[in-house]
Amino acid sequence: MNKSKGILLSSLVLLGMLLITVNASAQTTHIGFPISGTVFNPCNGETVTFSGVFNAVFAVTLDGNGGFHSMYNDQIHVTATGSLGNSYEGNEEDHSPLTGRVGVEQTFSSTFSEISKGSAPNFEQHSLFHITVNPDGTVTAFVTNFTSACR
């Protein structure tokens, strides 16, 4: 995943977590908005420009015993055109339950596929997310690592 898309998705996850972990009781937040940017197809060296829609639901509950239980669901749909004239479509859905102790670091990953509508090679974008949730439920650390690979 290129840095602009990765930073956008990372920011969205962080925003969702911050919006819902401020409250000690269960909280659910829905967000949705248009997305756009560029990614690099490592299979053919093409720069791919995409646009589409991002929708997500975040839910976090602090359990009162030093733990938290969260659920993150997202759906992304994009269409894209590459610098070599190729067309792509990307769809992704994640369902990420996360249970942990506040103050403990957690790590999870996500994969997003870009599917060619022609003879160009398909490719995947991989993201690694790392968070720390403080005892009051706020997120204090969020580190990402992005890579891409041919399919």
Image (cartoon, rainbow, N blue to C red):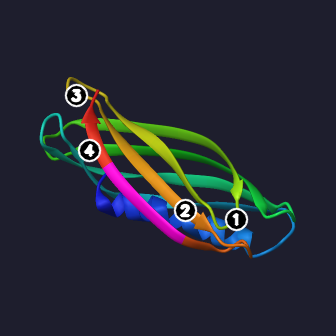
Q: Which residue is mark 3?
A: 121
Q: Which residue is mark 4?
A: 81
Q: Is residue 25 left or right of residue 91?
A: right
Q: Position of residue 127 (x, y in %)?
A: 41, 49
Going 70% across and 65% down the picture, which residue do you hit?
102
Measured in 3D between alpha carbons, the distance from the residue under mark 2 to the one under mark 3, in whole angstroms, is 33 Å
Q: Position of residue 29 (x, y in %)?
A: 73, 63
Highlighted range, magenta: 141-146
Of tags 3 and 4, the one toward the viewer is 3
Tag 3 near tag 1, CB within 8 Å: no
Q: Is residue 128 left or right of residue 4?
A: right
Q: Which residue is mark 1?
A: 102
Q: Mark 2: few, some, or many residues within 10 Å (few <14, many ≥20)? A: some
First in sequence, mark 1 or 2: give its number. Answer: 1
**Residue 142 shown in magenta:** yes
**Residue 129 shown in magenta:** no
